Image (tube, grey):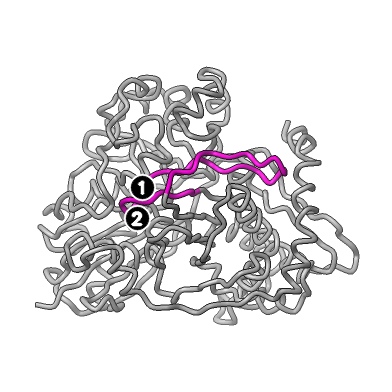
């Protein structure tokens, strides 16, 4: 009987599922859209039952029908979800409130400030490995304890998205060790065990999931889950991981010296190293990097974090300035983003003297400033939507370049850069990134996404691939962009303006939020 491997990823605005065969070729591919709630400034939530689990159930049935295979032919299932979220559930794994999303949600800023004062800077560095920020899930658990005590009292587990999906499939409460030892600090220790000495400030030790490697077979599909998903009861399921990790694996981030930038709703990066790299603050004003952590690939480490805006910034530009094109798209016309990409490509580097700061939802890496705001600088009456459109793409490009400068300051410049995510569909945007980086940029095939990575991890978990090296060897080569040296020099010269616009206006931004 021919075997297949299933991957399901729950993203910020879309969920996608991919079924691959024993040759690791795509047998079926499907997506379903969903929304993200923004009930208050700085708050971002999703319904775990309706969106996360609901989308998984839909996609399983769609993929089985689309491929024409029998459910019993699926040898293993892998899942991923958007970053590290905070979802309180009861003893039956029923969500008690909407999930508080990853680092884009900044509601726990007061808790982060209180914890910093409570511990002191030296202890914060020891426990968290970096200044406490919106990406730290422990701060959100503390927020729930302080602001929603009735929900907190009913909580049996505090889960992240991938853990919730695995529980619903298998009944097993587990979390990828890379996620646990990254965004869930200080609830876990370096060896993946629960840090009972530090847990008490946030929750009980028995309220968080057990650590496992992302490729571990942790259970099988239960009869109840089989009835809802259409999968066969008894199908093996791996631990699963975060969406960015899954996408990084899907494009070949398995060896040191490789940097991966994912352009989705936000820009998330992973940089694989052969040794642990601690947190770092740039004396040049280029921001800061969180300390590294153990990566999904055994024996490696990674630096990783995300911005708050990439696709969300281009979406904002689309909705504000391309409403006619968006309406035409809904009526069967050209995709509005395709129009935007064409217009951006026609504008020269520098957007005719216009620079944008992308911090419309505050910023995580490399600023860690929830009160940072966006800005248009150099605006003239001769500028139109095309220049604003390109300036938004360049803003995300400058942020990418800023991270590369930090890697250089640390003495670990990357040898290879890979990109992925929905943003890679925009050729003008990717060329901007390539020109700013000043080095070749590998763009994988369109199907090399988080759900494809989930399926490949499932194949590795069940033994169809013998190692991560074999996984990389099975991946397609993708296409490679080359930088324009003249454009690279232009962006090098103008980057300090981008950097200093934030540094010189940071206090004004903060005062404007009061």
Give yes or no for contact between labels 1 and 2 (Cβ–Cβ under 8 Å): yes
* Residue 232 point in image, percent of width and height: 13, 63
Q: Residue furthest right?
A: 381
Q: Secondary structure at mark 1?
A: helix
Q: Residue at x 80, y 53 (%)?
A: 497
Whether residue 228 is in magenta: the answer is: no
Q: Which of the pair 216/477 is nearer the observer?
A: 477
Q: Residue furthest bottom?
A: 333
Vertical order, 244 against 134 (above or below): below
Left or right: residue 184 compared with residue 208? right
Whether residue 295 is in magenta: the answer is: yes
Q: Secondary structure at mark 2?
A: strand
Q: Which residue in the protein does label 2 denote? A: 80
Q: Residue at x 54, y 50 (%)?
A: 306
Q: Residue at x 78, y 53 (%)?
A: 496
Which quadrant is home to the N terminus?
bottom left
Left or right: residue 319 compared with residue 165? right
* Residue 109 point in image, percent of width and height: 57, 31
Q: Which residues are magenta?
A: 275-304
Q: Residue furthest top?
A: 118
Where, by quadrant of the figure, is residue 62 drawn? bottom left
Left or right: residue 319 compared with residue 84? right
* Residue 113 point in image, percent of width and height: 58, 25
Mark 1 or mark 2, earlier in chain: 2
**Which numbered tag is attached to residue 396?**
none
Q: Which residue in the protein does label 1 denote? A: 161
């Amino acid at each position: 009987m021919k075997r297949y491997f299933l991957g399901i990823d729950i993203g910020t605005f879309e969920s996608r599922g991919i079924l691959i065969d024993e040759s690791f070729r795509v047998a079926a591919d499907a997506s379903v859209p969903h929304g993200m709630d923004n009930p208050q400034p700085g708050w971002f939530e999703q319904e775990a039952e309706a969106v996360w689990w609901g989308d998984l159930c839909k996609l399983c049935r769609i993929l089985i029908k689309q491929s024409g295979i029998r459910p019993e032919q699926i040898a293993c299932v892998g899942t991923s979800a958007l970053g590290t979220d905070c979802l309180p559930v009861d003893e039956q794994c029923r969500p008690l409130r909407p999930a508080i999303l990853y680092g884009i949600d900044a509601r726990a800023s007061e808790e982060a400030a209180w914890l910093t004062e409570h511990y002191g800077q030296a202890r914060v560095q020891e426990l968290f490995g970096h200044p406490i920020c919106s990406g730290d899930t422990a701060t959100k658990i503390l927020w729930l304890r302080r602001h929603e005590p009735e929900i907190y009292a009913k909580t049996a587990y505090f889960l992240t998205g991938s853990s919730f999906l695995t529980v619903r499939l298998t009944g097993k409460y587990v979390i990828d060790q890379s996620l646990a030892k990254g965004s869930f600090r200080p609830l876990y220790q370096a060896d993946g065990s629960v840090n009972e000495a530090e847990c008490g400030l946030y929750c009980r030790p028995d309220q968080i999931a057990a650590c496992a490697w992302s490729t571990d077979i942790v259970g099988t599909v239960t009869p109840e889950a089989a009835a809802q998903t259409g999968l066969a009861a008894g199908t093996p399921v791996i631990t699963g991981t975060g969406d960015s990790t899954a996408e990084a694996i899907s494009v070949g981030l398995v060896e040191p010296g490789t940097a991966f930038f994912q352009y989705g709703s936000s820009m998330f990066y992973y940089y694989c190293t052969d040794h642990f790299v601690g947190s770092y603050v740039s004396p040049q004003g280029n921001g800061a990097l969180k300390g590294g952590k153990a990566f999904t690939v055994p024996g490696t480490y990674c630096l990783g974090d995300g911005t708050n805006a990439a696709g969300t910034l281009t979406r904002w530009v689309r909705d504000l300035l391309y409403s006619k094109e968006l309406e035409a798209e809904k009526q069967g016309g050209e995709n509005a983003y395709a129009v935007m990409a064409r217009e951006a490509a026609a504008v020269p580097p520098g957007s005719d003297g216009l620079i944008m700061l992308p911090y419309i939802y505050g910023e995580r890496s490399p600023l860690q400033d929830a009160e940072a705001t966006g800005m248009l600088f150099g605006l003239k009456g001769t500028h139109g939507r095309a220049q604003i459109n390109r300036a938004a793409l360049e803003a995300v490009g400058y942020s990418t370049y800023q991270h590369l400068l930090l890697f250089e300051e640390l003495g670990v410049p990357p040898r290879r850069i890979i990109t992925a995510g929905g943003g890679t569909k925009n050729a003008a945007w990717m060329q901007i990134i390539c020109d700013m980086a000043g080095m070749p940029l590998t763009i994988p095939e369109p199907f090399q996404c988080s759900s494809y990575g989930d399926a490949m991890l499932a194949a590795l978990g069940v033994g169809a691939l013998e190692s991560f090296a074999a996984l990389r060897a099975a991946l397609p080569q993708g296409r490679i962009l080359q930088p324009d040296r003249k454009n690279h020099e232009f962006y090098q010269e103008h980057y300090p303006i981008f950097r200093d616009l934030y540094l010189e206006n940071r206090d004004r931004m903060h005062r404007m939020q009061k």
